[in-house]
Image (cartoon, helix red, strand yellow):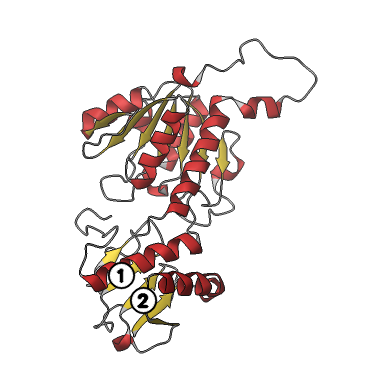
Amino acid sequence: MLKLLFADRIENWPAYEPALKSALAEMGIAAEILLPPADPGAIDYIVYSPRGPVQDFTAYTRTKAVLNLWAGVERVVGNPTLTQPLCRMVDEGLERGMVEWVTGHVLRAHLDIDFFLAHQDGVWRQAGHVPPLARDRSVVVLGLGALGGACATTLASLGFAVTGWSRTPKTLAGVTCLSGPEGLRAALGRAQILVTVLPNTPETTDLLNRETLALMPRGAVILNPGRGTLIDDAALLAALDTGRIAHATLDVFRVEPLPPDHPYWAHPKVTVTPHIAAETRPASAARVIAENIRRFEAGETPLHLVDRARGY
């Protein structure tokens, strides 16, 4: 019988216990799920969270893989004690959550809903506030992996003129796909609404800075459900103050929880959401974990295996 270690915060165990046991049973996998502390030498797989109690993997000599509960792996991929294969979480629930958050906030910006909410004062302001059709609104998605690609194709299906950018060339139906440094400049130049769904890597740190923000159309809107390190905070605040950027809706930050005295909280052109765009759902995540264990045991290629060199 396989032995799994659930290495997330203990308060999450009641939600994950039935989901994991059900998913493993459906796959026909005989496994015992243990909680820390447990004998490291007996563990076959670690169900891992960066917030959990396991940060030193040295003693887990029998462990075949570390299965991350988060889509992001930046907090663990550089851990020198991690020699086991690492798989990140990409599941249907997480993907749909990201798509729904992005779609909702793109529509909010596209329809200028905040303006009307701020002017419930009895004055009829139709002139100048009829939005263009979606086909006349340029939306740019930075990052065309599983999450970014799903967002881009969903927005395209609603009729938006969608451009996607990625480090390496991609092809998506209904989406104009660009890549490389020149492609990034071209994408930013047309980004009336910009959605960032990139991983946290050395190449993406401060990707949106004073120079790149200046490439965007004046009055553009930024949505960041990707990683807080993608944005130079000081540069974004300056761009908001000058009107270069009209509004920013931010779900992720360099420090989380966002400190109470951070300028984003009080800025009139910033909406803060508390890292909720792509939360892992136990039921769907458990199915991905069970499928990966099945694949490892069968000698098949695992899902979402992390490339250590690329950082995701």
Of the residues under marks 1 and 2, which one precedes in the sequence? 2
What amino acid type should be assigned to the residue bearing mark 1? Arg
Q: Residue 293 occupies which quadrant of the picture?
A: bottom left
- Residue 131 position (above or below residue 301): above
Give how far across and how far down residue 47 sits, in percent: 39, 72
> What residue do we see at 33% from left, 49% from top?
199
Give how far across and how far down residue 271 sits, in percent: 57, 40
Q: Residues within 10 Å of mark 1 (few under 14, many from 20)?
A: some
Q: Residue 141 occupies which quadrant of the picture?
A: top left
- Residue 29 position (above or below residue 158): below
Residue designated by label 1:
294
> What residue do we see at 50% from left, 24% from top?
243
Q: Secondary structure at mark 1?
A: helix
Residue designated by label 2:
29
Q: Nearer the viewer, residue 263 or 222?
A: 222
Q: CA distance from mark 1 to mark 2?
A: 7 Å
- Asked if the residue at tag 2 contacts the one at tag 1, i.e. Cβ–Cβ closer than 8 Å, the answer is yes
Label of residue 68 in the image: none
Quadrant into which the N terminus falls: bottom left
What amino acid type should be assigned to the residue bearing mark 2? Ile
Q: Is residue 97 visible?
A: yes
Q: Is residue 231 visible?
A: no
Q: Nearer the viewer, residue 13 or 271?
A: 13
Give how far across and how far down residue 161 sits, in percent: 40, 23
Give how far across and how far down residue 235 sits, in percent: 41, 36
Q: Nearer the viewer, residue 12 or 32?
A: 32
Horizontally, is 301 left or right of 267 in the view? left
